[in-house]
Image: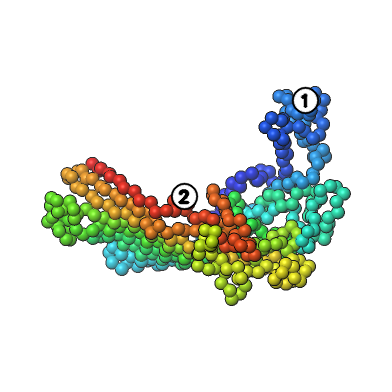
């Protein structure tokens, strides 16, 4: 069992700021040549005639008393008051068998369970479903919005969905991990490993998003964050790695041509190969509803049973690769309707109105990569040798695509690529190991002495 440290979550409150909520003020100048102008009057002598700061203004023009703050639109950031330390429990059962003095195999069942993981469900959220178009926050103090007693926001004067850290998340990992290892003998060594595993979680990656756009309705009974308990975005079902090296048995002191010398040994001897092969399945992702089904919450599309959501990767007329089948998806009808939008599926529970009791997920493109090296050693003297290296990265020049809708890490998603009603649905805008995707070949000489 391991108790985890608290994550660095960027701009959100830390544990020392776990009073109910905090907020911040932003004062922005209208342009580069105009100073900030405060909206409220500053105390006499603390600002310029146009209510801009001076060198001595300090905080004089900033309302630090809560009763002087206009709450309209402020975000309430916070952290769970009774904060619990996240922990994980790990276990494994491993068998290893030696087939030969230099060859062994291993198989292991590995499990990890995590509890009280930190999640960000947001603050000031609705606790029931309202029809699309319902206004939940007030623009002015006199606006009429749904009351908290009937599922409206607890604080309708404030902004909806600000940062709130809680310990509601959990996850599990179960995996079969196998390997075969050949220790160096007769010029050959290798390691082959295969893993079949599954990771499910409702704890979103705090700083890099998750397999979708966050929780659908974290405070609505019957939904909550546990309705988003699905495959983690780093889940990869099948992973195969194969790496090794082989010294060719030709040349002086080798199995063939062991008595070779001079030019013959220089040509035939000293060759070696090395390789690294990675073959793995894709990572899961969600498809959002093209149109929302209720106010202030999110919605995920259904994958229609019996229809394959994936197609082989193909090139569209606009030049982008694509991989999704639009007829395999549908969305729930908007809350309170029976046919809006057209082709929707009528549902009658909050979770189903938002896309299901569990998220429908699609496996993204696989990742395949082959790296290869060819070495040639020239033994100049007993203590000095020269090595010529030729290295081929992604030798098959095979592209590894991101999934449709992926954006981040310096790349942009294709607009509309997750809208199954659009013309660009399923299109892929980037590759996974950009900018190192194309085949790369490099040569080098190394002198050992």
Q: Quadrant of residue 352?
A: bottom right
* Label 1 neighbour load within 10 Å: few <14, some 14-19, many 20+: few
Asked if residue 241 lies left or right of residue 18, the reply is: left
**Viewer-side residue, 119 vs 404:** 404
Residue 113 in view, yes or no: no
Asked if residue 93 lies left or right of residue 333, the reply is: left
Residue 443, given in percent of the width and then of the height, sits at 31, 47
Residue 32, given in percent of the width and then of the height, sits at 67, 32
Residue 251, given in percent of the width and then of the height, sits at 17, 56
Q: Secondary structure at mark 2?
A: loop
Mark 2 sits on what residue? 435
Mark 1 sits on what residue? 48
Q: Label for residue 271?
A: none
Q: From what the image shows, is residue 378 above or below residue 314?
A: above
Label 1 – label 2 distance at C-alpha:
52 Å
Furthest residue in direction front, as rendered = 317
**Viewer-side residue, 244 vs 4:** 244
């Amino acid at each position: 069992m391991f108790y985890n440290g608290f994550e660095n979550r960027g701009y959100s409150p830390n544990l020392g700021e776990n009073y109910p909520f905090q907020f911040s003020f932003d004062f922005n100048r209208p342009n580069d040549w105009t100073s900030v102008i405060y909206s409220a009057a500053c105390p006499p002598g603390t600002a310029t005639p146009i209510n801009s700061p001076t060198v001595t203004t300090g905080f004089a023009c900033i309302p630090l008393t809560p009763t002087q703050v206009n709450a309209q639109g402020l975000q309430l950031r916070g952290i769970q008051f009774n904060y619990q330390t996240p922990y994980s429990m790990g276990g494994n059962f491993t068998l290893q068998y030696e087939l030969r003095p230099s060859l062994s195999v291993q198989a292991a069942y590995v499990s990890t369970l995590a509890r009280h993981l930190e999640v960000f469900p947001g603050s000031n959220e609705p606790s029931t479903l309202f029809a699309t178009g319902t206004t939940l926050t007030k623009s002015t103090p006199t606006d009429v919005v749904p009351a908290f007693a009937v599922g409206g926001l607890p604080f309708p004067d404030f902004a909806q969905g600000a940062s709130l850290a809680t310990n509601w998340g959990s996850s599990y990992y179960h995996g079969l991990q196998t390997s075969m290892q050949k220790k160096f003998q007769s010029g050959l060594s290798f390691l082959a490993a295969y893993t079949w595993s599954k990771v499910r979680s409702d704890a979103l990656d705090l700083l890099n998003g998750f397999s979708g756009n966050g929780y659908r309705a974290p405070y609505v009974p019957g939904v909550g964050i546990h309705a988003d308990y699905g495959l983690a975005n780093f889940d990869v079902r099948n992973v195969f790695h194969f790496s090794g090296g082989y010294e060719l048995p030709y040349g002086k002191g080798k199995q063939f041509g062991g008595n070779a010398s001079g030019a013959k040994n220089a040509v035939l001897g000293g060759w070696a190969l090395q390789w690294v092969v990675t073959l793995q399945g894709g990572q899961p992702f969600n498809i959002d509803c093209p149109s929302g089904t209720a106010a202030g919450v999110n919605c995920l599309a259904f994958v229609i049973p019996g229809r394959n959501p994936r197609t082989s990767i193909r090139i569209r007329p606009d030049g982008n690769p694509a991989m999704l089948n639009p007829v395999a998806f549908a969305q729930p009808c908007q809350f309170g309707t029976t046919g809006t939008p057209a082709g929707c599926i009528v549902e009658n529970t909050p979770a189903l109105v938002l896309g299901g009791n569990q998220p429908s997920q699609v496996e993204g493109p696989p990742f395949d990569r082959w790296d290869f090296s060819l070495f040639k050693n020239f033994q100049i003297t007993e203590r000095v040798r020269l090595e010529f290296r030729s290295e081929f990265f992604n030798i098959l020049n095979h592209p590894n695509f991101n999934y449709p809708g992926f954006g981040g890490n310096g790349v942009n998603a294709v607009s509309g690529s997750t809208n199954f009603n659009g013309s660009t649905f399923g299109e892929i805008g980037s590759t996974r190991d950009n900018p190192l995707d194309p085949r790369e070949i490099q040569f080098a000489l190394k002198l050992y002495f």
